[in-house]
Amino acid sequence: MVLSRVVEVRRFERVGAHSHIKGLGLKDGKALPIAAGMVGQVEAREAAGVIVSMVREGKMAGRAVLLAGPPGTGKTALASAIAKELGEDVPFMMITASEVYSAEVKKTEVLMQAMRKAIGVRIKEVRKIYEGMITELEIKAGRHPYNPYQQIPIGAKIKLKTNVDERSFNVDEAVAQELIARGVSKGDVIWIDAETGRVTKLGKCIEAPAEARYDIEASPRIPLPQGPIAKEREFVHTVTLHDLDEMHARRGSVFTLLFGGREEREIPPEVRQEVDETVKRWVDEGRAEVIPGVLFIDEVSALDIEAFSFLGRAMEGELAPVIILATNRGVTKVRGTDIVSPHGIPLDLLDRLLIITTREYTADEVKEILKIRAAEEGVDLEEDALSVLIKVGVENSLRYAVQLLSPSFEIAKRSGRSKVTAVDVEQAKKLFVDVKQSMAYLKEYEEKLLR
């Protein structure tokens, strides 16, 4: 067969600011200079490793962590690395303190929702399913009840096969719609949930008939299922306490039935109490496991005395995540009071925090971070370009240097180059100024700008 035209489909990838972080980069509790996307900050990473051990041993109750250091010294990266070390499905909820005051609900409600989004529940349930390779598939169509000119699926006839069993099924319109939505065809291996009719497409069977195969297949090839078609299988899925709160809050609401939303944005305390009791019952029955995640609050000095009091009480709760706070503030007033305190945090709460300090990066560390970020963003740098960026990272800020990577690459592409040169970086610096240059601009045009 001749392919007259092949269209390349590029997968869209969003590269996050800390998508390169894979863990703390420790070996036997000691930080490697460069590992798991982390560079430098040896003492801070080793301290974070101790925190991870304490969390795993259940010794963080009533405590929280404070990351203190100048801007751009890896505090958010450190919090993200702690969450990665705790496990793949461990929830990581990140907010900034200023978000607490920009919502339409009470600040304590915002903090409570954030905390419950940071606590996972791993639910195990055994469900009856029908599993097999589709050998026959016939979708039955009928007239739409409100539009006689439109055809809709009203059912289907399917035949499933395993290595020892083969059965035919007549299914209703709900399962037929699931089959169409999943793009199921002959030769596919599927699961059908006996209770809900939900269809899961696993992939194309290795033993699919020749007419059911494609010359180019994107879905995985899997073996023919073993055993009977009807079987019980254990499913494990992770949700957060906030997910369960919302599900319970929506239950029985006429508004939800009509529009699929909730009448109110705040969740009543009795709903949360009911969810907590349900989760405890599931845990006692062996059907669920609670996974404390990480709640990271940046710019914590922006919280006021009421929010700090709430956090202090929440830390003592039975169901509480690992709370990590971050600040780049020195000695300042606690918001909402005239009390001056280190980092703008009340002393009674500060006494209950394990404080980890970060320091500014050296030129060699800036170089390694830039190389990692360039690789993550797909930017190829010439040595002279890297040297200019290192100088920018040391003299201006690391964040500014990292921000210049992608603009410099775009400028290089416009000039027909695949590698970024020093000229491209200098051009990007002229187009995008840093904080110091922005301040100089404000002073120069102070009289012409609005106050």
Image (cartoon, rainbow, N blue to C red):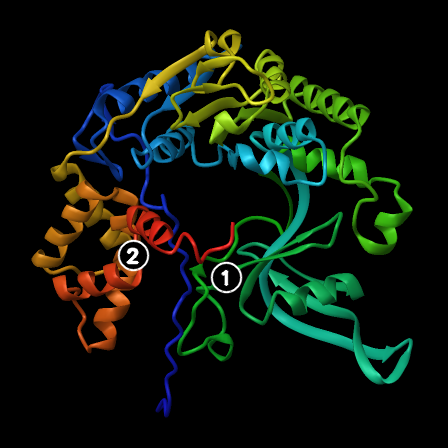
Name the residue rendered at 51%, 54% in the picture.
450
Label 2 vs label 1: CA separation? Answer: 32 Å
* Amino acid at dot 2: Glu
Image position of 286 with respect to 185: above or below: above
Name the residue rendered at 59%, 17% in the picture.
337
Residue 365: image x %, image y %?
Answer: 16, 37
Number of marks in picture: 2
**Badge 1 element:** strand
Q: Residue 377 got which mark? A: 2
Q: Nearer the viewer, residue 59 or 444?
A: 444
Residue 364: image x %, image y %?
Answer: 12, 38
Q: Nearer the viewer, residue 311 or 445?
A: 445
Name the residue rendered at 22%, 19% in the picture.
28
Residue lying at the far left of the rendered structure: 383
Q: In the displayed structure, does residue 263 sit left or right of residue 333?
A: right
Q: Nearer the viewer, residue 312 or 389?
A: 389
* Amino acid at dot 1: Gly
The quarter of the image holding the N terminus is bottom left
Residue 262 picture quarter: top right
Q: Nearer the viewer, residue 29 or 284?
A: 29
Residue that carries the numbered disc 1 in the rendered image = 203
Q: Earlier in the sequence, mark 2 or mark 1?
A: 1
Q: In the displayed structure, does residue 55 sit left or right of residue 39?
A: right
Name the residue rendered at 66%, 34% in the picture.
242
Which circle, 2 or 1, is nearer the viewer? 2
Mark 2 surroundings within 10 Å by alpha-carbon count, few (fewer than 14), some (14 through 19), many (20 or more): some
**Badge 2 element:** loop
Residue 114: image x %, image y %?
Answer: 60, 32
